[in-house]
Image (tube, helix red, strand yellow):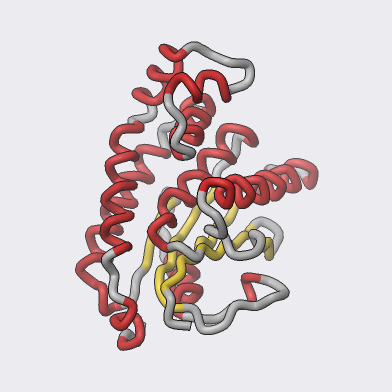
Amino acid sequence: MDKLHAVLTGDIVRSRSLSHRQLEKVRNRLDWCTEQLNGLKRRLVHGRVDFFRGDSWQMLLNEPTQALRAALYARAALLAFEECTTRISIGIGPVTEISRRRISQSTGKAFVLSGHALDQMKPGERLAIELPDAWRETSAWLKVMLRMCDAVAGHWKPRQAEAALRALEGLTQTEIADAIKPPISQQAVAKALAGGDWNAIDAALAQFEVAVGALPTKAAKRSTT
């Protein structure tokens, strides 16, 4: 398979403090994220999110340009509705074989890179990305961009995360106000988005999508990373 994919690998932060019921709700929320993301862009997520080792999960995206949006969406949803967070690593590259049974049993560069990025995360980091060596220059500044996004999202409160979640869906401030339960005012939405530095996140998303969309497939074949 020459087509580029993105693999999101994550684990739940401080999962040992969660009860079995709470952890099950977290898994259900990530399933919900898959459904929502596929509603925003048809067949964005391949299959279902896969869970393993109790608190770890993996998601395969057919459109790597949407990887940062999907990662922030999952992070915002968990904080807004389950009051927990997750580390997420993004690996972008070709996929050799996609398992029909479990996504985590699939093979290819994107899976290797995603797992490596998660293993290499430093304490306090919760968002990372890894690309093949052929794209070293692009990878370098994307890593910096994601570190800045991580810092911004790290300050979100649950209400700010919910506002960001709806903004990631492309809703206007008025639509976000109506979508939040119970509904709030448009002014309250504007305050939540400003407090969560949404404009910075939105600008980063646009640049990420342009950069990843320009990656050449052939470079992935030559890379040995």
Spot the residue most to the front.
42
Pick the residue in front: 45 or 112: 45
Spot the residue most to the left.
137
Q: Residue at x 49, y 11 (%)?
A: 185
Q: Residue at x 46, y 27 (%)?
A: 160
Q: Residue at x 57, y 39 (%)?
A: 77
Question: Up-down: is 151 above or below 95?
Answer: above
Q: Position of residue 138 (x, y in %)?
A: 23, 65
Q: Position of residue 125 (x, y in %)?
A: 41, 51
Q: Quadrant of residue 80?
A: top right
Spot the residue most to the right.
21
Q: Position of residue 130 (x, y in %)?
A: 37, 67
Q: Position of residue 209 (x, y in %)?
A: 33, 55
Question: Up-down: is 10 above or below 101?
Answer: above
Q: Residue at x 39, y 17 (%)?
A: 191
Question: Up-down: is 45 above or below 158?
Answer: below
Question: Up-down: is 197 above or below 8?
Answer: above
Quadrant placement of the C terminus: bottom left
Pick the residue in front: 66 or 160: 66
How many marks on residues?
0
